[in-house]
Image (cartoon, grey):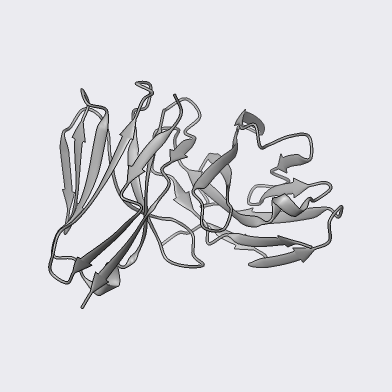
């Protein structure tokens, strides 16, 4: 019930392409869905987050799509750049204590 | 831009020893967290802390672990008797409200030998 399933495990995209990472959850109590970017040896950096009252949120090249009925959400990286090469984690949380449950992570490689 | 800081960046300790990992959350934040990440795996929740008490803890956070906010700025994680399987990156995080954005520190790599 507390799991967040993330796919794919790894992704290779050409520069300028679109990277798409998907996550699914079971617990309907989750009401906060952030995406984090992590470079090797660094902490997770908040990229973008969404709440269930909207179906899409866009910030620059990054877009979250949210499907409440399917309990799925995804990250789209438009015009992917080599600098976007990192591990991306989706997460889900609820407002009570704010703890986050993370997905397994997706290693993205953007080829020049 | 305010950020969460953690010290040390790397700690090596022998099995059975006590370690204290330190964090300075963002100054006006009220909710504090510890997570860990075993090499190559996902980030796992350990404990949340608010109003000077633990608000939630995971199964990982057993009696060997404790947290403390000894003053107005620091937030610490103590492991009383380290085990080999405690080797991981430990991340501190903070947020202003329970529903707000959660920001992570750079982590402390703990190596237990």
Placement of the C terminus of chain A among the 4 image quadrants: bottom left
Q: Which residue is found at the position 49% from the left and 53% from the top?
A: B104
Asked if A21 appears above or below B49 in the picture, the reply is below
On the question of residue A93 being in view, the answer is: yes
**With B69 as the anchor, is B63 left or right in this view?**
right
Q: Which residue is found at the position 56% from the left and 58% from the top?
A: B39
Q: Which residue is found at the position 84% from the left and 61% from the top?
A: B14
Q: Position of residue A9 (x, y in %)?
A: 36, 52
Q: Which residue is found at the position 28% from the left and 72% from the top?
A: A83
Asked if A62 appears above or below B99 in the picture, the reply is below
Q: Position of residue A31 (x, y in %)?
A: 34, 28
Q: Position of residue A41 (x, y in %)?
A: 51, 67
A78 or B76, nearer to the observer: A78
**With B64 as the anchor, is A62 left or right in this view?**
left
Q: How many marks?
A: 0
On the question of residue A92 being in view, the answer is: no
Q: Position of residue B5 (x, y in %)?
A: 56, 60
Residue furthest right in the image:
B16
**With A40 as the anchor, is B67 left or right in this view?**
right
């Amino acid at each position: 019930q507390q799991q967040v399933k993330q796919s794919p495990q790894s992704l290779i995209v050409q520069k300028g392409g679109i990277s798409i990472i998907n996550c699914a959850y079971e617990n309907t109590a989750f009401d906060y869905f952030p995406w984090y970017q992590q470079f090797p040896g660094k902490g997770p950096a908040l990229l973008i987050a969404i709440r269930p009252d909207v179906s899409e949120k866009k910030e620059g090249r990054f877009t979250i799509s949210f499907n409440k009925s399917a309990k799925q959400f995804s990250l789209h990286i438009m015009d992917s750049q080599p600098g976007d090469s990192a591990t991306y984690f989706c997460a889900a949380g609820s407002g009570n204590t704010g703890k986050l449950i993370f997905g397994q992570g997706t290693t993205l490689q953007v080829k020049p | 831009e305010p950020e969460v800081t953690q010290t040390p960046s790397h700690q090596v300790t022998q099995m059975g020893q006590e370690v204290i990992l330190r964090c300075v959350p963002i100054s006006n934040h009220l909710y504090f967290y510890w997570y860990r990440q075993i090499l190559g795996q996902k980030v796992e929740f350990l404990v949340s802390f608010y109003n000077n008490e633990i608000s939630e803890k995971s199964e990982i956070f057993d009696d060997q672990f404790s947290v403390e906010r000894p003053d107005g700025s620091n937030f610490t994680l103590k492991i009383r008797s380290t085990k080999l399987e405690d080797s991981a990156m430990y991340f501190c995080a903070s947020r202003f409200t329970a529903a707000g954005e959660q920001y992570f520190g750079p982590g402390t790599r703990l190596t237990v030998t």
